[in-house]
Amino acid sequence: MTTPLFLLRCVQIGLAIGELELLTIGTVNDMYAEMSNDDWNYPEIATQEMMDRF
């Protein structure tokens, strides 16, 4: 990953430059990957009862 690509991903996620001191490159990559899952329509979303049984 190049520096410009990393900074682009930070902007797309909405991170400020000051926040980058607290995050690793891996964390930013994970946040970017999870951002793409935000629009996914899951067929079933777990309830608290399901989590308690788990």
Image (cartoon, rainbow, N blue to C red):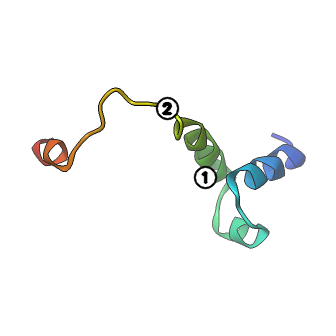
Q: Residues within 10 Å of mark 2 (few under 14, many from 20)?
A: few
Residue 44 horizontal/vertical position (percent): 29, 31
In 3D space, how far apart are the residues under numbered discs 1 and 2 (Cα atoms)? 21 Å
Residue lying at the far left of the rendered structure:
53
Asked if residue 53 lies left or right of residue 45, the reply is left
Q: Amino acid at mark 2?
A: Trp
What is the residue that sits farthest to the top in this orientation?
43
At 34% across and 26% down in the image, what residue appears?
Answer: 43
Q: Looking at the rendered structure, which numbered label has been put on residue 27?
A: 1
In the rendered view, would you say 36 is above or below 3?
above
Residue 9 placed where, x, y %? Answer: 75, 47
Task: Determine crowd level at label 1: few under 14, some 14-19, many 20+ residues with C-alpha closer than 10 A.
Answer: few
| Disc number for residue 40 | 2
Question: Which of the two residues, 25 or 51, is positioned nearer the viewer here?
Answer: 51
Dot 1 and dot 2 residues touching (CB under 8 Å):
no
Give the total of numbered labels: 2
Image quadrant in which the N terminus is located? top right
Of all residues shown, which one is farthest toward the bottom?
A: 18
Indicate the quadrant where residue 46 lies.
top left
The secondary structure type at the circle numbered 1 is helix
Q: Position of residue 29 (x, y in %)?
A: 65, 45
Q: Residue at x 82, y 52 (%)?
A: 7
Above or below, 54 against 20 in this view is above
Front disc: 1 or 2:
2
Give the amino acid at mark 1.
Answer: Thr
The residue depicted at 16 percent of the width and 41 percent of the height is 50
Image quadrant of residue 18?
bottom right
